[in-house]
Image (cartoon, grey):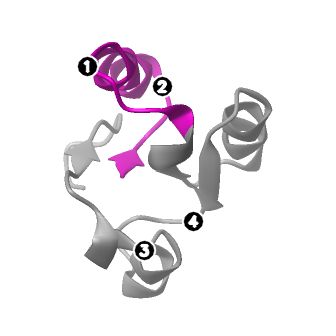
Amino acid sequence: VVVGFGTKGRSAIQTLCATGLSKEQIVIVDPASKVIEAANAEGFTGVLGDATRSDVLLRAELQKARQIIIATQRDDT
């Protein structure tokens, strides 16, 4: 699960893909619908919402994640 699909998130995702993870194994959480649309268009699963909310993390199936990467623009996340 990658929280944030900006510059930091995309960089983290590139690294994950370079180590052998497929796009289908990566879930992106972001509060912006346009960002999630872009993630979906690139072949990722996107979950729209605020990652500080437990219901959003449940939809992202965080409990199944092997890794969680926080790559937001906000320092309080």
Comes first in the chain, label 1 or label 3: 1
Q: Which residue is mark 2?
A: 6
Position of the C terminus by quadrant: bottom left
Disc 3 versus disc 4: distance between alpha carbons? 13 Å
Quadrant in the rendering for residue 75: top left
Q: Which residue is mark 1?
A: 19
Label 1 close to label 3 by CB (< 8 Å): no
Q: Which residue is mark 4?
A: 49
Disc 2 versus disc 3: distance between alpha carbons? 21 Å
Disc 4 versus disc 2: distance between alpha carbons? 15 Å
Q: Nearer the viewer, mark 3 or mark 4?
A: 3
Q: Position of residue 36 (x, y in %)?
A: 69, 45
Q: Residues within 10 Å of mark 1 (few under 14, many from 20)?
A: few
Q: Amino acid at mark 2?
A: Gly
Comes first in the chain, label 2 or label 3: 2
Residue 5 is covered by the magenta coloring: yes
Q: Which residue is mark 3?
A: 61
Please give the range of residues in magenta: 1-23
